[in-house]
């Protein structure tokens, strides 16, 4: 059952309560409706991927009520501050390095050391984000591959019964997703055109790298060996050698002393929530102990298992 809430005091409070408890709530922004989940709660973020039937763990955008709140979790540079002053609140997303001690779960950023952040320009969304008082991950509130929703009715067409609630703020004013800029390098790179024009951005910070160049070198999930740990990963392991760490799914197979359990009861949503933390921990601890690799037990190719296996195949791909 999906609750339909309205942006009055009780509706905002109910939506915020649901988000804080790990439930999913769709809400309107100036661009499109977002499917919100607590970005600090890995299990909640895993439910976003499950609800959208998202085939890969692509980085999600974290939404904040103010620039100051966003910059608690990322390292802003002078360009980021200038853009925030010019376009936030608004349809601009900035990709910046995660701060040490960042609250956001690794799954939210697809295991990267960067984070996509924005402050939406919609009064109801800002009230909701302030009430939640933590970052909210929110891709478009539709099943993957379908048209992005600009009304609550659009959300319900695809996600009714799959999410806890939708906060109905009426139709979205902009109707296209936010512009995404990568600000981690020497020059800003356009990852996605959107609600803020390139001309407006360049009027504030000067030239930016075009989309074609960005797609070739920076777009998440494009490289076969993207997000790979330092230790080699061996897939479909039914046993582990003495010099391998084990990424377990269900009862651990024999042989490994260093084990990270994705899900004791072989639940793919639980496993998705723990995947990036597990890979990072096994990589660091395995290197410290002088191990030669990570053996990953099989995960079924169904539901979120497809996204988990996509990530594991990329981690195991041959290195350049």
Image: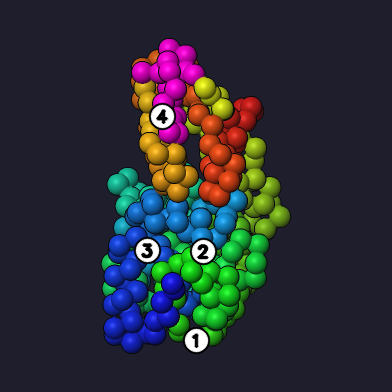
**Disc 2 designates what residue?**
139
Q: In what quadrant of the picture does the N terminus appear?
A: bottom left
- State how far apart marks 3 and 1 are (Cα): 22 Å
- State how far apart marks 2 and 3 are (Cα): 15 Å
Left or right side of 6 for 217: right
**Disc 3 designates what residue?**
23
- State how far apart marks 1 and 2 are (Cα): 18 Å
Identify the mark at residue 170; answer none if there is no mark. 1
Of callouts 4 and 1, the N-terminal one = 1
Name the element at disc 4. Answer: loop
Q: Nearer the viewer, mark 2 or mark 3?
A: 3
- State how far apart marks 4 and 1 are (Cα): 48 Å
Left or right side of 67 for 171: right
How many numbered marks are there?
Answer: 4
Q: Nearer the viewer, mark 3 or mark 1?
A: 3
Q: Residues within 10 Å of mark 3 (few under 14, many from 20)?
A: many
Q: Residues within 10 Å of mark 2 (few under 14, many from 20)?
A: many
């Amino acid at each position: 059952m999906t609750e339909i809430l309205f942006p009055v005091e009780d509706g905002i409070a109910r939506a915020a309560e649901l988000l804080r408890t790990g439930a999913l709530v769709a809400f309107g922004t100036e661009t499109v409706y977002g499917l919100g989940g607590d970005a600090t709660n890995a299990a909640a973020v895993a439910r976003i991927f499950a609800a959208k039937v998202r085939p890969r763990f692509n980085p999600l955008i974290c939404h904040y009520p103010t620039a100051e709140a966003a910059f608690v979790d990322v390292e802003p540079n002078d360009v980021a501050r200038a853009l925030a002053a010019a376009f936030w609140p608004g349809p601009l997303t900035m990709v910046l390095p995660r701060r040490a001690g960042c609250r956001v779960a690794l799954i939210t950023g697809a295991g990267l050391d960067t984070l996509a952040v924005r402050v939406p320009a919609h009064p109801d969304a800002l009230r909701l984000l302030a009430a939640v008082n933590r970052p909210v991950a929110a891709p478009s509130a539709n099943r993957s591959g379908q048209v992005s929703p600009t009304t609550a009715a659009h959300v319900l067409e695809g996600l009714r019964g799959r999410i806890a609630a939708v906060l109905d703020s009426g139709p979205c004013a902009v109707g296209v997703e936010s512009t995404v800029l990568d600000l981690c390098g020497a020059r800003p790179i356009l990852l996605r055109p959107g609600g803020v024009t390139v001309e407006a951005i360049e009027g504030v910070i000067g030239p930016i790298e075009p989309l074609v160049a960005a797609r070739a070198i920076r777009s998440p999930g494009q490289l076969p060996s993207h997000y790979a740990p330092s230790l080699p990963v061996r897939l479909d392991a039914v046993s582990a050698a003495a010099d391998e760490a084990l990424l377990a799914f269900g009862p651990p197979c024999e042989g490994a002393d260093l084990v990270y359990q994705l899900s004791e009861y072989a639940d793919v949503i639980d496993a998705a929530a723990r995947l990036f933390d597990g890979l990072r921990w096994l990589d660091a601890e395995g290197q410290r102990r002088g191990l030669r690799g990570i053996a990953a037990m099989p995960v079924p190719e169904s539901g979120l298992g497809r996204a988990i296996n996509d990530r594991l195949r990329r981690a195991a791909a041959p290195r350049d």
